[in-house]
Amino acid sequence: MRPAAPWRRRGLLATVAATTAGRALAQGFPQRPVRLVVPYGAGNVTDQLGRLLAEALSRRWPQRVVVENLPGAGGTLGVAAVARAAPDGHTLVLAAMAAMTVTPHLQRGQVGYDPLADLAPIGLVAVTRGALAVHPALPARNLEELAAQARRAGPVFYYLAGSGTLPHLNMGLLKSALDAPLEHVPYRTSAAGLADLLAGRVQVTMDAASVTLPAILDGRLRALFWNGPRRNPALPGVPTLAEALPGLDLANPWLGLLAPRGLPAPILAWLEAGLAAVLATPGFAERFDAGLEPLGGGAEVFARQLREDHARFGALLARLNIRPD
């Protein structure tokens, strides 16, 4: 028998450790439907994951989990609303890495919450992967050729949805590593940027796989590397970042479940166990969108990851001198 995946083993262990105590100490919880805030619009990859999670948790819990979309300001409006909510476990947020570790540095004192002090991590849910994709008219077939093309013919323009995002940081690191003139063109949405990339008005992106993978698979875009620990089975000929440029570490954004700070420990344990059990459910991860992978890791693991990434990206933003456009 094939051994369980690491995230599934962690889920099973967390369930065994926390379920008994959670049931005994959190009697009567939840007392009403649980509100799961998704701080992005309907149809976004986070929204799709949030609805899968709400559906699965609703089947396990005595009350429904209801998704509420609160988009705006790069996800910070929804996170701020949850930070202000009562810490009783009935209001949760599925937050993206950037809203917790990048934007608070860029908009210091303006996001309405301290990501390390105002929210209680429950567990990591998923990680998003992506590829560096180029328009086929660009002759580059690897990073060395991309850098040479940019130096020879002038700037190569890349789109990203917004500024100060994790893909923006990743592209800043890649630009520095290649020492080549790659120029950022910010777009309001990925859809608008992708349309211009497919039309050849910009040449490169490192958007999420949910955005670019269909165009890569049908030949409208070419992938130069896959940002993951192993090759994507759908793109067997595309090298990983480690193969394409050894030594460069680019972030893979996570999505995590959080509650307002001050959540009673028994309720936190109960929520943590429920999330772990859902992630360990056979077939749950197979419903994820392209480029989205289950992550796992409970409250303690998530809290440590949050602290480390908050410090890491604060230093990186300063080093790259990245600011909102």
Image (cartoon, rainbow, N blue to C red):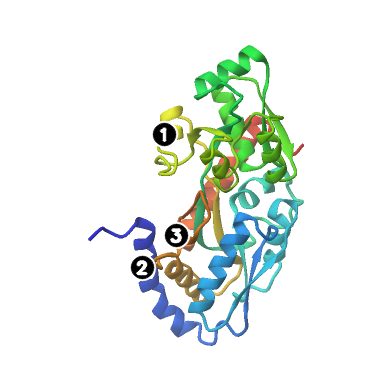
**Residue 20: percent from left, percent from top:** 39, 80
- Check disc 3 and report its element: helix, strand or loop: helix
State whether residue 163 appears in this view. no
Answer few, some or many: residues within 10 Å of disc 1's Cα (few below 14, many 20 plus, some between 14 and 19).
few
Residue 107 in sight here: yes
Indicate which disc, 1 or 3, sits on the residue closer to the N terminus: 1
Which dot marks residue 237? 1
Q: Mark 3 and mark 2 in contact? Answer it, CB < 8 Å.
A: no
Q: Which of 136 and 241 is in front in this view?
A: 136
Describe residue 310's horizontal placement relative to residue 155 as left or right.
left
Q: Which amino acid does label 1 sit on?
A: Gly
Nearer the viewer's eye, disc 3 or disc 2?
3
The three-letter code of the residue at mark 2 reads: Leu
Is the residue 323 above or below the residue 85 in the image? above
Q: Which mark is residue 141?
A: none
Determine the residue positioned at 55% across, 75% down: 264
Comes first in the chain, label 1 or label 2: 2
Marks 1 and 2 sit apart, C-alpha to C-alpha, by: 35 Å
Q: Give the percent coordinates (x, y) of residue 203.
A: 65, 28
The reply to whether discs 1 and 3 touch (Cβ–Cβ < 8 Å) is: no
Q: Please give the residue where the numbered disc 3 appears in the rendered image.
A: 286
Q: How crowded is mark 3: few (under 14 residues within 10 Å), some or many (20 or more)?
A: few
